[in-house]
Amino acid sequence: MNKNMALAFQDIQKKQAVIELKACNKMTIKYGLALSDGDINELVENRFKALKDTGRIEFSEGILKKIVEVFCDSPYIMQQNYKETLMEIQECFYFFKNEAMDQIADDELIEFMKIHFDGKCQGSLEYLSGTNLEELCRNTRYGYKVNDTDI
């Protein structure tokens, strides 16, 4: 695929991501959460930056829609921190997907993140990425069973 085709494909992916995130507002509004057009554009741009920073590529829809669907009911996410939290979760996802050497399914990693974010991390993304996700990835790399008893 030449550079022009790659850029055209990326533009299509961005437009699709914008449509998907706008549609998510219908679901998240009941939790008092909504993304403005500017927020959506920023999140989509952040997605492609995070992919580039982690050396990843996606050919289908990104994980942001799944993250929104799973995390929107968190008691630790409010309108004031919604966009920033989604950005950080997205960046963590891609980073730890690499750290786990793609041995964890997307949905499984997102669910793990949500359980711990709402559980013992009490909404702290720093705690989530610095402890729970590190442990998950380390255990995955070395073939150890993931211990979820302390969720």
Image (tube, rainbow, N blue to C red):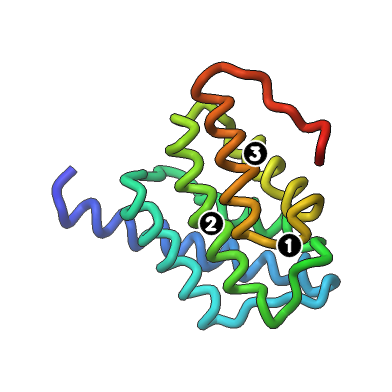
Inspect the image, locate mark 3, and give the three-letter code of the amino acid beneath it: Asp
Lower sequence index among marks 2 and 1: 2
Inspect the image, locate mark 2, and give the three-letter code of the amino acid beneath it: Gln
Q: Which mark is residue 82?
A: none
What residue did someone put label 1 on?
Answer: 123
Q: Is residue 119 left or right of residue 48?
A: right
Q: Which mark is residue 107?
A: 3
**In terms of secondary structure, where does tag 3 sit?**
helix
What residue did someone put label 2 on?
Answer: 90
Q: Cβ–Cβ below 8 Å for labels 2 and 1?
A: no
Q: Above or below — where is 50 with respect to 144?
A: below
Q: Residue at x 53, y 30 (%)?
A: 138
Q: Residue at x 46, y 44 (%)?
A: 60
Along the viewing direction, whichever of 100 and 128 lies nearer the viewer: 128
Screen quadrant of the C terminus: top right
Q: Is residue 65 left or right of residue 9?
A: right
Percent across and percent down for residue 122 are: 78, 59
Percent across and percent down for residue 121 are: 74, 54
**In terms of secondary structure, where does tag 1 sit?**
loop
Residue count near mark 3 (Cα–Cα under 10 Å), binned few <14, some 14–19, many ≥20: few
Q: CA distance from mark 1 to mark 3?
A: 19 Å
Q: Cβ–Cβ below 8 Å for labels 3 and 2?
A: no
